[in-house]
Image (cartoon, rainbow, N blue to C red):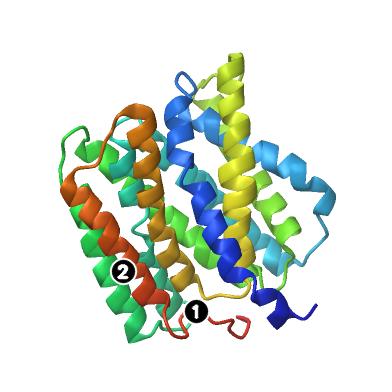
Amino acid sequence: MSSRAEGRFAVPVLLVAVAAISSAAILVRLGTGVHPVALAAWRAGIVAVLLAPTWRPFGRRDGALVVLSGLCLALHFGTWFASISHTTVLRSTVFVCLNPIWVGLGEWLLLKRPPGWRYWLGVAVAVLGVAGMGGDLDGGSLYGDALALVGGLFGSAYLLTGRVVRQRVAIGSYACSVCAVACAALTVVGVSASVPLGGFSMPQWTVIAALALGPHMIGHNGVNYALKYLPAAPVAAVILLEPVGAAALAAGLFGERPSRPELLGGFVILIGVWMATWRGAAEVVDPVR
């Protein structure tokens, strides 16, 4: 199957991936008693082991970028997981998903592929929706919001690096290596900070396994698949749908029911994502060199 033919699956795969990623904040909240660093380290480590049979060697240039991507992923997980302990699921997910702004700027300044005006207009509309969903501090904190915002910045760097590396490195090799680097980095941090990395209960191990198999194996790997065929900017725009799914799950599981402004904000996000990816924004593009 040709690269362009494979690319036809990029958008459906991305939508399924975002649906899977939407459960991540819920699972982190359910992992009560597991330190965020331990939760992130085990998630990345399990995925690395599962993908090990698909690993194939790649060049030094890509190896350096993979290490950078893995470190960004580790920092993304660490800061975002910590934020969920200090703010609501909705607010944490909203702030971590502001990455279309950072990814659009990075793709413009670093990859010399400026997104079109439709992308920026759609992102502006979606961000207005995000502001509507996250504007109330009830149940949250500025510290938790700041952690989620920093997590989004590292997540953006992870997406941009993946966009470059995925043009030359197969999905299995890339995802396995990135997770291995992230796991190693998080384990070093955990040991240095005397974070308990084991001795968890069966429900806690179940949450860890669910995080690895759902949000990562389906979610992150789906995003990494799409990054070979789609610019990082519209991929990040579609990820703005995550707060909508996370809010719906949090309402059912934790009673964190969205207010009318939050529901309206979710609808505005949907409109903004459609605008950002409409008419050519999500077409298969020539690979980044």
Q: Amino acid at mark 1?
A: Leu
The picture places residue 246, in percent across and down from the top left corner, at 39, 44
- For label 1, the crowd category at 10 Å Cα-Cα, with few meaning under 14, some 14 to 19 and many 20 or more, is some
Which circle marks residue 111 in the picture? 1
Q: Amino acid at mark 2?
A: Ile
Q: Say what secondary structure mark 2 lies in.
A: helix
Residue 183 visible, this orientation:
no
In this picture, residue 107 sits left or right of residue 185: left
The residue positioned 56% from the left and 45% from the top of the image is: 215
- Between disc 2 and disc 1, the foreground one is 2
Where, by quadrant of the figure, is residue 9 drawn? Answer: bottom right
In this view of the protein, which residue sits in the foreground, 201 or 289? Answer: 201
The residue positioned 58% from the left and 14% from the top of the image is: 201
Please name the residue that numbered disc 2 is placed on. 271
In this view of the protein, which residue sits in the foreground, 182 or 101? Answer: 101
The residue positioned 56% from the left and 56% from the top of the image is: 16
